[in-house]
Amino acid sequence: MQTRKKRTTVFVTLAVVALTVVGASAATAQFEGGQEPGAGVSDGGFGEMEGGNAADAVYVREDGSGVLVYNGTGDTNGSVTFGADMSTGLVHLLANGTAGEGFAGDFSFEAEPTSWMANGSFAADDTGMLEEMTLDVTSRSDSTDSSLDAQLDATVSSGLAALAPTATTEGEIVTEPDRLTSSGSVNYRMSLGGSSVREVSRFDLTENNGGYVLDARERRIVRGEPQFPDDPGTGTGNEPRAIQPSRTDPAEEWGTRERAEDTLSARYTAFAENVSATANLTLESYSFENVTVESGLGSTTNESLIDVEYTVEYTGVQEGIADALAEDMSANASQETVDEVAQGIRNLTVNRLSFATVSGENGTQLNWSVDVENYNDVFTSFMRLSSELQPSGADPGADAMGGASSSPFLSEGYFDEVINMSQKQMEAAEAAGLVSRWEWSGSLESQGGSSASSPFGSGGGSGATATVTADISHTTENWESYVTELENRGVPIANSSFELTASTTDAGIEGSMDWETEGEALAEGYQTTLKAYESALRGSDEINASVIRHINESGFRVAKMDATVSDGKWSVEGGAAFENGTALSSAIQSLTGYGVTETVGTTQNGTTSTYVKSDSLVDDPSGESVRSLEEVNDETAVNLPGDWDREFPEMDTSSAAEYLGVEEDGTGDGSPLPGFGALVALVALAVVAVGLGRRD
């Protein structure tokens, strides 16, 4: 096991809490030379420790407690002070540094177990490729309504804009309790133009008396099958000769009506035969001719063109697919689940699947239409199937709590919770008659910077601009009734609102954002997420699943972060409070073997040092025992009991408590749930990642 592993585990587990609440500062600061936030702070703060993998010094007391010291590289561009105190469950960070000119902004964030609030604004001098832009996004979800509206209008200057002179799209997706419909179109024209030959592909599949009928038309260029020589020979210097495949004559497959019918029948009957179904093809019309094709670049080729219309009648397809899947799954899943999946497929109804394209010298048009229903049973049955199927390499006989499998997997208990929640939501949607509708439209218009031979023109695209518009909306029907039905089934909801605006001005670009969410659904959703992490670790010998459980027991109270960038400087203050700080220490101890009581980092004379304090660093404070620590190597300064007399920085818990608005003694209304998921889940993921990194 490498020396750095345990030190990294301790450090990341504690520091990632503070990192999480300040991470958004990356979006609010523009640093010199492409630096990221914190680049002006010495690496000893949160990054790689100077000297590589081991502590720079260790100080041990008679009772086995001690302090590991890590010193970063010197850098006077910024400073940082941070701490994590297990006795009070407080985490706090203060940092500042220098930033590039031309950007100003602020960001604030605050989270409690059942709420989230974030807002900020920014202004930048440099708009990049944007010539003009207006962006407005508004979203709302509460007990009476759920909706979203987003509009974008922008003009972008780029040589790539000349590639597509025009493009449009529009469409909608509508979901009902057990039905999904969608229709839409995409049209575009490329600057190089299209083929002089108009090509058409149309496929329309509909349900018919328990079977399916496919109506199709194909008008397209066809080429023969590639043929590769058995012996390509050698070229100059006896190197292998480049393979030059030839092609069969397209007429062999399409040259007569009978050949075309045989070719199409082989295509569709092969699929049907694979699932013990039947497919009967009728060729309605047929045409085959040789044509001259001129491309948008002006070159011409002689090609073969087919134009066929046909129908295919399928019988027993769904039954065949259900039986085939049941046979494949029977060895790895319970018979009950296999039967459930098969029945779900039989119940699925595909009313219509339609797809069509038309392309030629004037561009390409694409249209689709989808109408599917009775798919809820398929969804829940496949979820249950996923809970039973072992991933590749897993040991089906491994203890679910313990660990002898070679691959982590999600437990059946986790899937049972997800399936139960999904079924309640489906039942509520059906009882309320919930309808959800997404609609969109968009367009692109380009001009300038192109020529007949190059999309970039003689100036490499100079002067090419694209005007982009986009509108997206989400609306619901019977939402209030749906919420009532959810509440009747014990399913919590969260109220949320989100607003984002950004626009160009004479001075550059500016924008603002406000986001608020509250409700018990937040806490329950994050608990489910952490349970998934813990479930994924059970049965794995990589890491102890108790790490997640300890974090889950931390009793989250509040997290905050405030960041500003202005006048070439940036500053960040952030923190978090937990009801049970020792739970995080237990998470560390389950990986390292010793507990951590406090971690403190300070910057002095441009160098940031980190102090990791433990009340159980070693059992025996002798030199041999201390030097056997993985955090200690030949370059570590070892200070045994009686050989040193110094004080170490303490975390300012009073300032942390005041900033967070909590009592310093750690009392308060801590959440019995995993806490605020975006924060705690990342802590969990960091611990897991570090633990996995402990392998040699």
Image (spheres, rainbow, N blue to C red):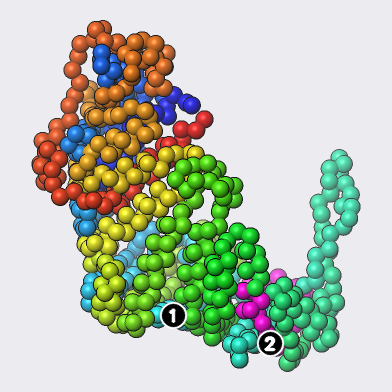
In the image, is residue 255 above or below residue 413? below
**Residue 571 visible from this viewpoint:** no
Type of amino acid at the residue the image marks with label 1: Asp
Q: Is residue 256 left or right of residue 433?
A: right
User: Camera-side residue: 404 or 36?
Assistant: 404
Residue at 87 percent across and 57 percent down: it is 229
Residue at 82 percent across and 87 percent down: it is 257
Answer with mark 1 or mark 2, whichever residue precedes in sequence. Answer: 1
Q: Is residue 142 left or right of residue 310?
A: left
- Per the rendering, the mark at residue 178 is 1
Q: Position of residue 9 (x, y in %)?
A: 37, 33
User: Camera-side residue: 689 or 92?
Assistant: 689
Residue at 28 percent across and 41 percent down: it is 17
Q: Which residue is mark 2?
A: 313
State the count of labels.
2
In the image, is residue 493 above or below residue 263? above
Type of amino acid at the residue the image marks with label 2: Glu
Q: Secondary structure at mark 1?
A: loop
> Does the magenta-highlighted stretch encompass residue 353?
no
Tell me how far mark 1 sits from mark 2, CA to CA: 26 Å
Label 2 packing within 10 angstroms: few (<14), some (14-19), many (20+): some
| Residue 587 figure quarter | top left
> Does the magenta-highlighted stretch encompass residue 298?
yes
Residue at 84 percent across and 59 percent down: it is 228
Q: Is residue 248 left or right of residue 109?
A: right
Label 1 packing within 10 angstroms: few (<14), some (14-19), many (20+): some
**Residue 649 visible from this viewpoint:** yes
Image: magenta residue range: 295-322
